Image (spheres, rainbow, N blue to C red):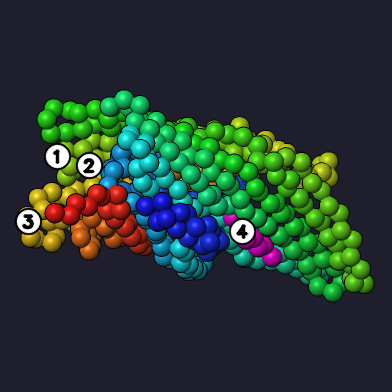
Amino acid sequence: MKTRICGCLMLAAVCMNAMAQGGTKSPYSQYGLGTLADVSQSMNRGMNGVGLALQQGDQVNTLNPASYAGVDSLTMLFDAGVTLQTTNYKEGGRRQNGSMADLEYVVGSFRAWKGVGMAFGIRPFSSVGYSYSSTTNLGNSSGTIAEAYSGSGGLHEVFLGVGVQVMKPLSLGANIGYLWGDMSRSVTSSGGSNVNTLMKTYSVSVSNYKLDLGAQWKQPIGRKGTLTVGATVGIGHKLKADPKMDITIVNTTGSMDTTTFKVNDGLKLPMSYGVGAAYNHLGRLTVAADWTLEKWGSVDFPAFNSQTSQYELTSGLLKDRTKVNVGVDWLPTTNVLNRNFLSHVHYRMGAGLATPYYKIGNQDGPKELSVSAGLGIPVLTGRSLVNVSFQWAHTSAKDLITENSFRLNIGVTFNERWFAKWKVE
């Protein structure tokens, strides 16, 4: 048992760089810390990311670490997910498509002692990835100025979590993570051989901790139902990272002049809060809803101040982000003697609305409306599942780029009876 657990931990460590490459091609990723990732797993994705009040012994749910207390005592859970995405970008009458594929996360969970469950894994936190250009006509015979924008990188998290059943209805938990990654953004302005070229490069490297706390209260409702209420708190703190800005002027003669600015300890995670509720009927029907709030509005973010010619922390660039999700999971039967395969498939659907956490100029960024549908398909002995989900996400704001994304997530949840005691007669 110990050898297998250590093997899983080593596998996650060795594959760390390859298995958390959550990416994006959205121009909106140039703001803040980039596009924030959906950190839910394959089971949650079919319900549009709902999970703060879900506690299931056969699925890993990292959205609320208190859920680990309910893991099956006989099994070792291991979940890995791949996401395929295609996005249509629209601005005015212009359209463009982009696609990507990522091995997004790997997580595992097992019961350590009675009433104590543990989890570990690696998942994305945010991603930066864009490349576009624009041209401005200077008028008369002055020519044009071409500007090229690009960015890459992102933040990832490797974590270890524990959930404890304090008493029969109450479970508490915590995820302790290590957040790391590099992000870079650049803007290059050029106007031909008679005009100097201006290059602005923004870069930062992050390496710090992340802490999330959770609680769940599971209460029977009559003889056939269970109501679970969940709550989470993400601890806000400074990331001890030093964002840097380089301004380089390339003269028409070919000479270069570079000025470097740095903001010491210039990045910070906000406090975040979440509450959720889930009702389960006979182990077959689950209806759940989540609400989360991220206090980005209280976080200052580094930006170049043209009036003072300094790169400095600036307030008002970010705003509080809220997200509401609802989801349903339906299993036709729990009777193992039923031979109808489709009766043992989980059928899921969900919807959600998220507000932006950044501003573009003087207006808020785009909101995201999303809907999803998914299946949980039993394989092998029926304990393991292939979770397949489809999601459509519409991101838009007035006079800004509209994005329509179609995402396919395929996750495999291995549910192996590692801890069963065998008896020979």
Q: Mark 4 points at which residue?
A: 153
Q: Is mark 3 on a helix, strand or loop?
A: loop
Q: What element carries label 4?
A: strand
Q: Residue 26: x, y in percent? A: 54, 59
In the displayed orientation, state which residue is furthest to the front.
Answer: 425
Rendered position, 109 above or below 171: below
3 and 1 marks in contact (CB < 8 Å): no
Q: Mark 3 points at which residue?
A: 338
- Choose the circle earlier in sequence order: 3 or 4: 4
Q: Magenta residues, as a range? A: 148-154
- State left or right for residue 287 relative to residue 39: left
Residue 55 lies in quadrant: top left
Q: Residue 282 bears which disc, if any?
A: 1
- Choose the circle earlier in sequence order: 1 or 4: 4
Q: Mark 2 points at which residue?
A: 286
Marks 3 and 2: which is nearer the front?
A: 3
Residue 4 lies in quadrant: bottom left
Q: What residue is at 45 percent from the left and 48 percent from the top?
A: 120
Q: Is mark 2 on a helix, strand or loop?
A: strand
Amino acid, disc 4: Gly
- Choose the circle earlier in sequence order: 3 or 1: 1
Amino acid, disc 2: Thr
Q: Residue 273: x, y in percent? A: 46, 32
